[in-house]
Image: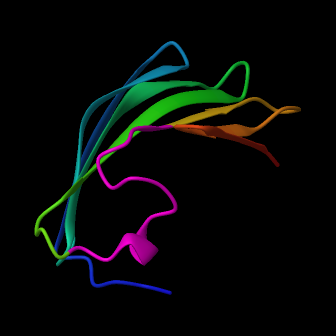
Amino acid sequence: MYTDLQCLVNKIEFEEGLGNIEIFFMDTPNSRIGAAGHINLAHESIDVTINPEKKRKDYSKKALPCKSRARWRIQASEHCPQMKLPGLAAKF
């Protein structure tokens, strides 16, 4: 499944191998998505929270595997990637 991407703005500021997501905004026909978090190049890890928000009341629940306004948290290291959704945890 895919969707059209109408806009994507992203700014990650890196200093001494540590990246801070200062701006992340993605716009699709059905949703707006923001994100915040950190990237550590030395430890090869990320900790990012993704905040999807639906645009319309008739938004299809099939497009997201959780409630459309629920936060997703992605934590990953070299040996232990994880994605946390409300009421659900997944390890890859």
Relative to 37, 43 lies left or right: right
| Residue sticking out furthest to the left | 56
Q: How is the image coloured?
A: rainbow
**On screen, residue 35 above or below 31:** above
Q: Main secondary structure of the magenta part?
A: loop
Judging depth in this view, the residue of 5 and 1 nearest the camera is: 1
Give x and y (percent) for residue 21.
34, 30
Relative to 79, 64 lies left or right: left
The quadrant holding residue 28 is bottom left
Q: Which residues are magenta?
A: 59-72
Give x and y (percent) for residue 63.
41, 74
**On screen, residue 9 above or below 83:** below
The quadrant holding residue 35 is top left
Give x and y (percent) for residue 75.
63, 30
Q: Residue at x 43, y 85 (%)?
A: 2
Does 60 appear in magenta?
A: yes
Residue 27 seen from this side: no
Q: Residue at x 59, y 30 (%)?
A: 46
| Residue sticking out furthest to the top | 16
Judging depth in this view, the residue of 33 and 87 nearest the camera is: 87
